[in-house]
Image: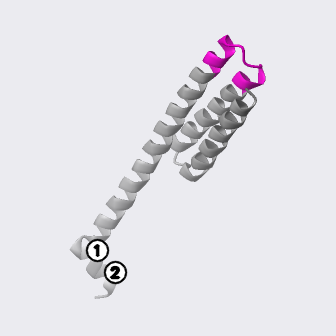
Amino acid sequence: MDEKDERFENGEEYEDEAADALDARRARWTATGTGSLLALVGLAASTLRLTGSAPVLVPGAYAFGAAVCALAAALGARGRTRRALWLLIVGVMVMALGDQFD
């Protein structure tokens, strides 16, 4: 009996697969939740800046950053968590850059 058969019989293989599935599910939920939250915050900030005396570029940057974060949430829900992470970073950077024009 080789090592793989022993691991399969002892249930270690099942535990490894279950742990991997749990990690993947947790990553999807984290990416989806974070993207959704950042999208809502970006839209709220865009609305607040639009009603104020800020230049048009500022609320536009917040809205564009929120759209990028919403796209990241959608990708995260589909399991593309690495791409979602980079899109979240880009979305927050766009919002921060837009805030600098205020």
The answer to whether 6 is drawn above or below residue 13 in the figure is: below
Horizontal arrangement in the rendering, residue 50 relative to residue 77 (left or right): right
Q: Residue at x 46, y 37 (%)?
A: 33
Most frequent secondary structure within the magenta stretch: helix
| Amino acid type at mark 1 | Phe
Residue 48: percent from left, percent from top: 61, 16
Horizontal arrangement in the rendering, residue 59 relative to residue 13 (left or right): right
The answer to whether 98 is drawn above or below residue 79 in the figure is: above
Residue closer to the observer: 11 or 47 = 47
Q: CA distance from mark 1 to mark 2?
A: 6 Å
Horizontal arrangement in the rendering, residue 9 relative to residue 17 (left or right): left
**The residue stretch that appears in magenta:** 46-60
Q: Residue at x 65, y 38 (%)?
A: 91
| Amino acid type at mark 2 | Lys
Residue that numbered label 2 is attached to: 4
The answer to whether 6 is drawn above or below residue 15 in the figure is: below
Does residue 84 show up magenta in the picture?
A: no
Residue 12: percent from left, percent from top: 27, 71
Q: Residue at x 72, y 33 (%)?
A: 100
Does residue 50 show up magenta in the picture?
A: yes
Residue 54: percent from left, percent from top: 72, 18
Asked where in the image residue 87 lies, by quadrant, the reply is top right
Helix, strand or loop at label 2? It is helix
Asked where in the image residue 13 lies, by quadrant, the reply is bottom left
Q: Which mark is residue 8?
A: 1
Q: Residue at x 70, y 22 (%)?
A: 59
The single residue placed furthest to the bottom in the displayed view is: 1
Numbered circles on residues, count? 2
Q: Badges 1 and 2: C-beta atoms under 8 Å apart?
A: yes
Horizontal arrangement in the rendering, residue 94 relative to residue 75 (left or right): right
